[in-house]
Image (spheres, rainbow, N blue to C red):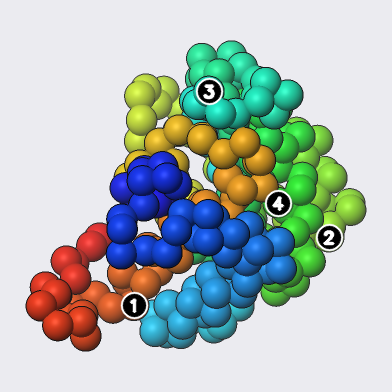
Amino acid sequence: MARTGCQWRYLPHDFPPWETVYWYFTRWHEDGTVERIHDALRTRVRQADGRRPEPTAGLLDSQSVRAADTVPRSTSGYDAGKKTTGRKRFIVTDTLGLLLAVHITAASVQDRDGARRPLLWTRLDHPSVRKIWADQGFAGRLVTWAGDILGRTVEIVRKQPGQRGFQVQPKRWAVERTLGWLMTRRRLARDYETNPEHSATMIRWAMTDVILRRLTRGHPSTRPGRKPLRRTT
């Protein structure tokens, strides 16, 4: 679903009834199974890359996306800067671009306000992360709050003087790439979920898909008649 963007009712016929699949989606969301699967695979990727299981630094960014008709107005808003009506995704990743925390808000929420919860979750779930890089939208009182309350350093990566248009920012390019990965998953090109927390879970499933492809890169599927997985970047 994350990859193709299909509706629950249009799942392929070789799956169980869509109501059963949706039941597992919500059950695994509620009991933390989705997070445990994702986090275990993230650790595998880090170790395969020669990194420690737990990161010591992170990257913070946000992304505003349009909301579908299924999104209630109470959880949607207007981002004047991006001219987008919908929701905003706040993510914290490690320096490989692998997801550590995700939080969904209305698009009208300011970056410095919406980032507090994922920073708190990162502090609780990944205490080894001591420093987080972010762009200029997170400057100001968020930096002070992170230092005083969380005991963590949020460093702002500023644009070069005279910069025009988009340029890859040092230290932050990995989190920007992660947001790009999410947008290649059709279910995430817009926000379709009635419950914002389900949006966060769909993002974790999408990142699980990214991680699995990275772990199995170059290894053919064991199913008979299936072609090898295509290489991804």
Which SS class for mark 1?
A: helix
- Left or right: residue 77 versus residue 158 is right
User: Label 1, on which residue?
Assistant: 215
Pointer 2: what residue?
A: 151
Residue 78 position in % (x across, y down): 61, 17
Q: How far apart are marks 4 and 2 (CA)?
A: 15 Å
Q: Nearer the viewer, residue 108 or 186?
A: 186
Q: Choose mark 4 or mark 2, whichever is in front.
A: 4
Mark 1 and mark 3: Cα distance apart in space: 36 Å
- Badges 2 and 1: C-beta atoms under 8 Å apart? no
Label 3 and label 2: CA atoms lie apart by 41 Å
Q: Residue at x 36, y 30 (%)?
A: 166
Residue pointed to by mark 4: 118
User: Which label was assigned to residue 69?
Assistant: 3
Tell me which label, 4 or 3, sits earlier in the chain. Answer: 3
Which mark's residue is nearer the viewer, 1 or 4?
1
